[in-house]
Amino acid sequence: MESNSDIKTTPKGFQCTLCNVNLPNLPSLEQHVKGRKHQTLSTVRHSRKTQEEHSVFVSGIKPEVSQTELAEYFQKFGSVADVIMDKDKGLYAIVQFSEKESIQATLSCVEHQMKGLKLRIKPREKKEFKLIPKKSDSDKQVLDRLKPQLCQLVSVDAQMQFVVERFQLGENEKKTRGLLVQLLQEVFVEFFPDSQIVPFGSSVNTFGVHSCDLDLFLDLEKTKMFQAHAKFTTEPEKGEGMSDDGHSEDSILSDIDLSTASPAEVLDLVSMILKRCVPSVHKVNVVSSARLPVVKFHHRELNLQGDITLNNRLAVRNTRFLQLCSGIEDRLRPLVYTIRYWAKQKQLAGNPSGAGPLLNNYALTLLIIFYLQNCEPPVLSTVDQLKDMACEEEECVIEGWNCTFPTQPIAVPISKNTQSLSTLLSGFFSFYAKFDFAGSVISVREGRTFPITDFLSKNKDEEATKEPSRIHHHSPKLGPLNLLDPFELSHNVAGNLNDRTQRCFQKECQEAEKYCRSLQYQRKSTKGKSWGLVRLFTPHGEVPHTKVEKLTISVPFKSALLPEALRNQLHAAGDGFRLLWFQKVCAAVESVLKNVLRCHVTPPTNFSTDSEDWAVKAAEEMETTSSSLSTSLNDSYDSVESQNEASPAGTAVVGAKRPLSPDIDTSVSPQGKKQRLTRRGKPKLPAWTCLQRHMVWAGRRKVRRELIKDPDMRPEGSCVQVESRVTAHIIEKEPELKEPLEFKVEPQVVGETESTKAVLHLEPTSDNAGLFNNFFHFLDAFLPKMVETLLQNETGAV
Ligand code: ATP
Ligand code: MG
């Protein structure tokens, strides 16, 4: 590779100082240097440098001096390419020449006089080109300041209370937000008579943090009535000044009929009003593609992001619900603030740009509420119970959804649960560490889960009549995490999550649960070390790793995505469904490695996943070697559990009823503890040995994009075929690796009390070029998706 001053060698590989990234090996470095980010930054740096070398800094001007006047004045020293004025005050400018020589000519002139002003000219400062530090850097500063403050407190409960104090919206912030709402109200009512601006979301739901956005609902219901009334009463004298109640008919309203206008049209008007009439508001954007179209804006002075939506009565109501929960239960706020901050640090929640595959804070808060409804005894009542506590005047139905609950917390009896904050926090982690996300739909309304199969049935009408609160309107969009809104029951509030986020959420809960069982969590360090919440808040990469990361890839069991025929087959298999499903997964994994990624795959001796008996033989093997098949795992786990003193009583353990690999590592427990069963001298379950001769993962996205774009090349058919073509293309174009990458894949099935999943243990057996890590990260995302696709096309014969 050509020499590049941006690249430094480090003990762990390379560092690109321009992009501020670390690369583990030469191939990934080469890939990075050719990549879009590096190329763009190089180009930007080059053009900045050229600008600097061609321009001078001019001060001593006045706001009335125009760009053209300046250009004309400097023209006498050389051709002027551009003049950039400071936007706010117009007191200085940068004049850019076409030729470098013009700078010398300008600087050598002793006095610059223009329109009676004495201009001062300086050469441009040479600034080192640097990436603007990411937001996470300032997050890091926040955490660095928070750590010692937390460490000196006496208990985890005190730390949690401190987190609330530290992050909650202050009184002044609430006041300024209130003033902005008032100002917007005054402006909007001018254009939309009788309209109302209603704040909702974290600014008012008692869970707001310093930088949280300001969510506003523009209620135009009364404006519509006003308009209808005005149309009716003023029709004959149209255009004659003022209406009866003094509203100007010359308003924007005369241009739009709210009864027929689309939300996008109304939002365009809203955006225009914001731009023209509200001081300090800028960056106004209409986002019509969102689930609920929204106008986004930024308030410069308050440094505040605002969102205005229409038709959002349900969100206003669920905000009231969260307020009520806070009022009923004092422990909720410390829990929510702590868990929100933990989730942010672990990059599980908070979708920075609004949309994204992470949990949003509303969904995360509902997960906390659901957990509290399921504590023993419950900390919070279910929404259905709250409904029954409300009086007649409090009845509320929005868009057909029952949103009734008491207005005042006093109407709700105090919980009998007296657990401390720290116990509830660790309980939250254990609860979700072993939660069956794949098989359940969470209902905060009823405070329980439903089996996912309840939502797969075609005959919804029939069910709806049986349980009207459950299935209403249409079914929710199912995904890796199914969390029904407590009011809009057909809405999965976590429908935006992808598999990865769901898996990471559960993995982080398992990690946190394990940590919460340590003394480091429970007791203040007498030696001034980090303890309690501090370790929980430490982002990835900063927690010292004591052991090598285990390279496992999980393929979750997702009944919802399987074709009808396969679902029926699994249903018929009864208890043995896991085994049958696992067999299909194994065949699909082998097919992806062999046919899609073109690995040379050596199947386990005497077994072939092409033949139906692969998994069956594995099970038979188990049957003859293990003492009792039907009880094998549960018994073994019991004995492991009973030896495990640190494990809290009552925590469920994982395990398949029919594990395929009872004598090797079974699975990772919900507590994150590896459960090792006693070896009984049985042979290990065979693994595939794979050989990869090409970097089929490198630049894959780009090749795919190009293949799909090119009409001659466009591969027809399923995405499996597309991916196979992508691999073929890479193999054709890129040279073979000098030393092929060799690795082992050992499959295993887990399930029962935990989500059913197939776990693939990967291990490099020959990797002299240090490529395995990159390949593994690619496979981690690619393999489960491909297997899922193959299973969806499953016709019975894999
Ligand atoms: P923050 O802005 O601090 O992230 P928030 O609670 O304000 O937290 P937003 O994403 O701004 O979260 O959403 C504002 C409000 O809109 C939420 O409080 C909730 O009332 C409602 N809301 C958000 N997402 C959903 C959703 N998926 N389903 C139903 N209501 C939602
Ligand atoms: Mg918000």
Image (spheres, helix red, strand yellow):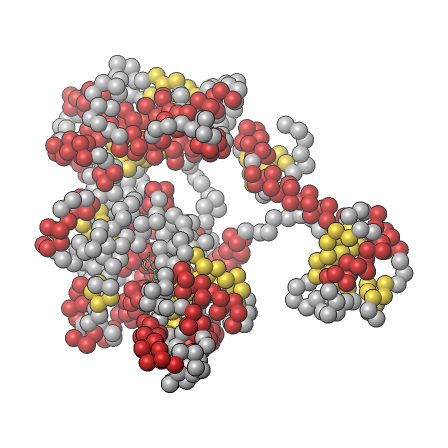
Q: Quadrant of residue 416?
A: bottom left
- Number of numbered discs on residues: 0
In-front residue for pair 749/671: 749
x, y percentage for residue 737? 51, 20
Residue depicted at 70% across the width and 61% down the height: 85
Q: Is residue 405 above or below residue 761?
A: below
In-front residue for pair 535/693: 693
Whether residue 241 appears in this view of the structure is: yes
In-front residue for pair 479/274: 274
In-front residue for pair 276/396: 276
Name the quarter where the N terminus is drawn.
top right
x, y percentage for residue 289? 40, 53
Q: Is residue 652 above or below residue 595?
A: below
Residue depicted at 21% across the width and 42% down the height: 753
Residue depicted at 43% across the width and 78% down the height: 239
- 614 left or right of 82? left
Q: Quadrant of residue 656?
A: top left
Whether residue 125 appears in this view of the structure is: no
x, y percentage for residue 303? 52, 66
Name the quarter where the C terminus is drawn.
top left
* Residue farthest toward the top in the current orientation of the protein: 606
Residue depicted at 22% across the width and 31% down the height: 581
Q: Is residue 114 above or below residue 27?
A: below
- 6 left or right of 497? right
x, y percentage for residue 105? 87, 52
